[in-house]
Image (cartoon, rainbow, N blue to C red):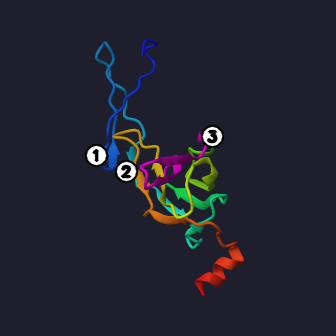
Amino acid sequence: AADGRSAKLEWTAQQSGPFAIMLTDEYGLHNQNSAERSWRIIRDRPPEIIEKSADESSMLAPDEPLIVQAAALDDIAIGQFQLECKFASGETRIVEVDSELLGIREVNHIFQFDLQSTVHQPGTTFAYRLQAADTRPLPGPQWVSTEPRNVTIHEISHTSPERSLVRE
């Protein structure tokens, strides 16, 4: 740096173990050996998504919102978390978690998608899935997604107590 007292080094670590830094100034003088240093490399794992409302009904009324409760977990931090709804017409809608709720290791969220904001008639089927990405800078975030779940829009859906009776 311009002040001659600081520097910044950046490199990609390939293995764990001890290391030393030797500095030489403009006069050829070297720093004295200092304390031993070592680092341990921990591989950045992709995020994990846990859908907490996975056993809910696959039927909704046109005026009933899709509600999905889920968590995204990562070893460093969650950078993005979203619910994606895809309709047979090719239309895709995405509901994202607000950025101020991200940047931590575990994000719990209740997604709510209002079907009234789309013009879909009873009998329409759509698929939704959850997607999450970590904050890895290089070569870029690691994205993961759940398997798509199909939902059919019915004229009248079943309330929660009625849903359990329908399954029996």
163 above or below 46?
below
- In depth, the one of 34 and 62 nearer the eye is 62
Task: Magenta stretch: give its range.
Answer: 76-100
Query: Which numbered disc, 2 or 3, marks the residue that appears first in the sequence?
Result: 2
Amino acid type indicated by mark 3: Glu
Q: Are marks 2 and 3 in contact (CB under 8 Å)?
A: no
Q: Is residue 153 visible?
A: yes
The quadrant of the picture occupied by the N terminus is top left
Residue at the (46%, 55%) spot, across then down? 47
Amino acid type indicated by mark 2: Ile
Q: Are marks 1 and 2 in contact (CB under 8 Å)?
A: yes
Q: Secondary structure at mark 1?
A: loop
- Disc 2 crowd, CA 10 A, few/some/many (<14, 14-19, 20+): few
Q: Is residue 122 left or right of residue 1?
A: right
- Disc 1 crowd, CA 10 A, few/some/many (<14, 14-19, 20+): few
Quarter where residue 7 is shown: top left
- In depth, the one of 59 and 12 nearer the eye is 59
Residue highlighted by disc 1: 14
Q: Position of residue 89 (x, y in %)?
A: 43, 51
- Is residue 85 rendered magenta in the image? yes
- In depth, the one of 56 and 134 nearer the eye is 56
Measure the alpha-carbon separation of dots 3 and 1.
33 Å
Residue highlighted by disc 3: 100
Q: Position of residue 53 (x, y in %)?
A: 60, 68
Residue at the (39%, 51%) spot, across then down? 40
46 above or below 56?
above
